Amino acid sequence: MLDHFDILAPVYDRLISPPDPARLTALLRLPTDGWLLDAGGGTGRVAAGLHPFVGGLIISDQSRQMLRRAREKPTLHPVQAQVQRLPFPDGFFDRILVVDALHHFFDQQAAVRELARVLAPGGRLVIEEPDIHRPAVKLVALAERMALMGSTFLAPEIVRDLLAAQELHAQVAERDRFSAWIVADKPSGETS
């Protein structure tokens, strides 16, 4: 099976710039002393800029070649794994980030369930995903379909609802001309 990301790995960081780190630190409510998981984090292009704001940082990805590039960034801990079966204990991560990757997960419902499982009570999950309502994203979706990438783009409201089904407090926090940011908080379990 063709792995598009193994092929793109050597040039990925030069082709696609990371999102605004100030936006991500605000959405993730950083800093935190805990661990951050960048699920589907590839080369670590996004997470590398967040290292000063977290206690530890793990990149999980399926692509061996993308993770090889992540290993070149000394502050990252790359782990090869499918997001549908993460090798981490329940509630391990204070923060989880998924940037431009959810549409590549082959079972998005299982992926969201697994992300909710490894998110700590009181933790926050942020998903940045191309907004399929936008015409430019519809063209990207068509191109990825033609390239046989197996992508499934979900509307931001559907992503929000998948997160809410896992008992996370989820909302579409921001949108721009291409992407949407969905933020989900896991209840702390404390009663007031």
Image (cartoon, rainbow, N blue to C red):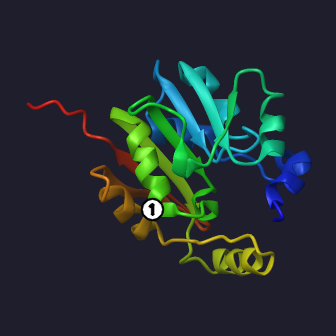
At 81% from the left edge and 60% from the top edge, which residue is drawn? 3
At 84% from the left edge and 52% from the top edge, which residue is drawn? 6
At 46% from the left edge and 46% from the top edge, which residue is drawn? 115
User: Is 92 situated above or below 133?
Assistant: above
Give 102 or 6, whichever is nearer the viewer.
Answer: 6
Farthest-out residue, left: 192
User: Is 39 situated above or below 170?
Assistant: above
Numbered marks: total: 1
Q: Is residue 36 left or right of residue 168?
A: right
Percent x, y of residue 118: 43, 37
Give 6 or 50, whichever is nearer the viewer.
Answer: 6
Q: Quadrant of the N terminus?
A: bottom right
Name the image quarter holding residue 161: bottom left
Give 11 or 81, whichever is nearer the viewer.
Answer: 81
Counting other residues with Cα less than 10 Å from the Cα at mark 1, is it few (<14), some (14-19), or many (20 or more)? some
At 90% from the left edge and 49% from the top edge, which residue is drawn? 11
> Mark 1 sits on what residue?
109
